[in-house]
Image: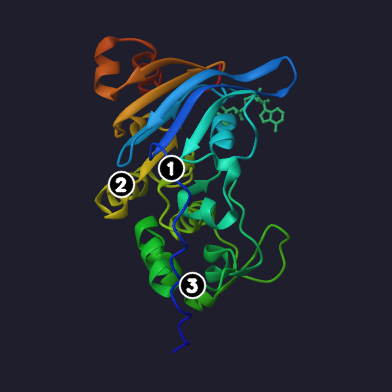
């Protein structure tokens, strides 16, 4: 057996905080002056709530996720993650506050363990195993030649095991959960999984003790994912055009209902 690294010590108490979960208040943002991509968006995801963000290609979903992750400053308005400005957080606090699974999964050349912990030796075995189980990645890791010590082929290629797109997504989900974050952002994080694995992951998130207080914002490609959320937000050209519990939106017969109808007729509603 390997010597187990000690569990990470609890960090000192954070500075005073406001509302928990995720709050976006009247945010406008763009990449080029005069060309806003996110326009006056306000939304909140409470602890324990799962909210799905849907909208056509280019409607600004990934840009909104990037703002929440603190990648960019908003032109106006405010974002708080677990009560704090994501741009003010230290890396250590950001990991505990926020887990992000991006649309483009990045694994690097290194072992499975290093990919899950981002090379932080203070992360304990129990945290790694819990995150892998929650993500549904435990069986996949166990089946690799050297389990958590299996070298992976990163973006720069090199030696190591090459994983499928779905397997890479499972590891990215596990990586985001290692620090048991208060807020989880999933940007089409399960598109490469089959529908059953996607549904199993959602159910595991809900059943998880941490998940009961975790705020989850999911950019959903599959409308089945959106229909399983507590609330759906429809984004169009950077604005929220509809919002509510999925069943209510379907009864109302508005935008979301139209998308569901298009999808069931076999159209890719995300494109034209
Ligand atoms: N880094 C960037 N620099 C400049 N423009 C960008 C950048 N990222 C996105 N955009 C532009 O912002 C707009 C919204 O893109 P975004 O990626 O947020 O859409 P999306 O809703 O996530 O689309 P998709 O469903 O295809 O993932 C698009 O017009 C895109 O070209
Ligand atoms: Mg996107």
Inspect this view and state whether residue 83 appears. Answer: yes
How far apart marks 1 and 2 lie (CA) works out to 16 Å
Q: Name the element at disc 2.
A: helix
How far apart marks 3 and 2 lie (CA) works out to 33 Å
Q: Quadrant of residue 140?
A: bottom left
- Residue 160 coordinates in the image, percent (x, y): 64, 71
Vertical placement of 145 versus 114: above or below? below
- Residue 109 coordinates in the image, percent (x, y): 66, 66
Badges 3 and 1: C-beta atoms under 8 Å apart? no
- Which dot marks residue 144? 3
Figure label count: 3
Precedes in sequence: disc 3 or disc 1: 1
The residue where tag 1 is placed is: 17
Badges 1 and 2: C-beta atoms under 8 Å apart? no
- Residue 104 coordinates in the image, percent (x, y): 60, 45
- Among all residues in the image, which is located at the extreme top? 253
Tell me what residue is drawn at x 31 percent, y 33 percent.
Answer: 229
Tell me what residue is drawn at x 63 percent, y 40 percent.
Answer: 71
Tell me what residue is drawn at x 59 percent, y 40 percent.
Answer: 70
Q: Quadrant of residue 216?
A: top left
In depth, the one of 4 and 167 nearer the eye is 4
Vertical placement of 184 versus 128: above or below? above
In depth, the one of 49 and 235 nearer the eye is 49
How far apart marks 3 and 1 lie (CA) works out to 42 Å
The residue where tag 2 is placed is: 213
- The quadrant of the image that shows the N terminus is bottom left
Tell me what residue is drawn at x 59 percent, y 36 percent.
Answer: 66
- Residue 35 coordinates in the image, percent (x, y): 70, 16
Residue count near mark 1 (Cα–Cα under 10 Å), binned few <14, some 14–19, many ≥20: few
């Amino acid at each position: 057996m390997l010597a187990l690294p000690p569990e990470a010590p609890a960090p000192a108490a954070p500075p005073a905080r406001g509302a928990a979960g995720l709050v976006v208040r009247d945010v406008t943002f763009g990449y080029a002056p005069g060309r806003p991509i996110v326009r006056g968006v306000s939304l909140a995801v409470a602890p324990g709530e799962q909210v799905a963000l849907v909208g056509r290609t280019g409607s600004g979903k990934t840009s909104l996720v990037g703002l929440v992750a603190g990648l960019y400053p908003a032109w106006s308005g405010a974002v708080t993650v677990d009560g704090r400005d994501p741009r003010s957080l230290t890396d250590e606090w950001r990991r505990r506050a926020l887990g992000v699974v991006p649309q483009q999964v990045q694994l690097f050349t290194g072992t499975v363990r290093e990919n899950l912990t981002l090379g932080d030796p203070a992360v304990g075995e129990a945290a790694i195993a819990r995150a892998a189980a929650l993500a549904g990645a435990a069986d996949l890791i166990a089946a690799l030649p050297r389990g958590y010590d299996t070298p992976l082929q990163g973006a720069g290629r090199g030696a190591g095991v090459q994983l499928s797109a779905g397997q890479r997504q499972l590891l990215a989900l596990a990586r985001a959960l290692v620090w048991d974050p208060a807020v989880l952002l999933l940007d089409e994080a399960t598109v490469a999984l089959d529908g059953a694995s996607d549904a199993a992951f959602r159910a595991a998130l809900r059943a998880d003790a941490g998940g009961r207080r975790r705020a989850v914002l999911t950019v959903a490609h599959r409308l089945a994912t959106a229909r399983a959320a507590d609330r759906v937000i429809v984004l169009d050209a950077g604005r929220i055009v509809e919002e509510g519990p999925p069943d209510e939106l379907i009864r109302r017969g508005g935008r979301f209902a139209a998308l569901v109808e298009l999808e069931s007729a076999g159209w890719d509603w995300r494109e034209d």
